[in-house]
Image (tube, rainbow, N blue to C red):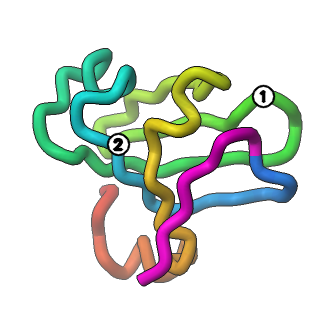
């Protein structure tokens, strides 16, 4: 499976599963000791997108935290629903 690590905001809409790198700024903010997974959502309306978790919590991504994510863009929205990662 291909992965993607961004240094800046994507050029087009992107909705995919993302892993938060252990010991990164995001991992420390969310107190995630292991690689945590979330949904990364960028809709080209400005900014760097958002991450969302299964419990409804979310966070805006900034230029400082965009590289804390490892994106898995090969899973589309239908496949993510099938996996049941987020209920």
Of all residues shown, which one is farthest toward the front?
7
State if disc 2 and disc 1 touch (CB < 8 Å).
Answer: no
Of all residues shown, which one is farthest toward the left?
33
40, above or below 33, in the image: below
Residue 82 location, quadrant: bottom left
Residue at 71 percent across and 33 percent down: it is 48
Which residue carries the number 1 mark? 47
Q: Is disc 1 surrounded by few (<14), some (14 to 19) or many (20+) residues within 10 Å?
A: some
Residue 22 location, quadrant: top left
User: In the displayed structure, does residue 47 sit left or right of residue 56?
Assistant: right
Region in magenta: 1-9
What secondary structure is found at the residue carrying circle 2?
strand
Residue at 53 percent across and 39 percent down: it is 67
**The one of 31 and 87 positioned closer to us in this rendering:** 31
Marker disc for residue 58 = none
Residue 1 location, quadrant: bottom left
Q: Residue 5 at x, y = what percent?
A: 54, 53
Q: Is residue 48 magenta?
A: no
Residue at 34 percent across and 42 percent down: it is 20
Q: Residue 70 at x, y = what percent?
A: 44, 54
Q: Is residue 2 magenta?
A: yes
Q: Is disc 2 surrounded by few (<14), some (14 to 19) or many (20+) residues within 10 Å?
A: many
**From mark 1 to mark 2, how far is it between C-alphas?**
19 Å
Quadrant the C terminus occupies:
bottom left
Residue at 75 percent across and 41 percent down: it is 9
**The one of 50 and 20 positioned closer to us in this rendering:** 20
**The one of 67 and 50 positioned closer to us in this rendering:** 67
The dominant secondary structure in magenta is loop
Q: Residue 68 at x, y = what percent?
A: 44, 37
Mark 1 and mark 2 lie on one chain; the one further toward the N terminus is 2
Which residue carries the number 2 mark? 20
Q: How many marks?
A: 2
């Amino acid at each position: 499976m291909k992965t993607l690590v961004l240094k800046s905001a994507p050029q087009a809409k992107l909705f995919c599963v993302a892993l938060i790198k252990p010991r990164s700024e995001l991992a420390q903010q969310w107190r995630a000791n292991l690689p945590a997974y979330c949904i990364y959502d960028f809709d080209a309306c400005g900014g760097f997108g958002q991450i969302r978790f299964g419990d409804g919590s979310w966070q805006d991504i900034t230029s400082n935290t965009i590289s804390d994510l490892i994106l898995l863009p090969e899973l589309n929205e239908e496949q993510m629903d099938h996996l049941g990662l987020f209920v």
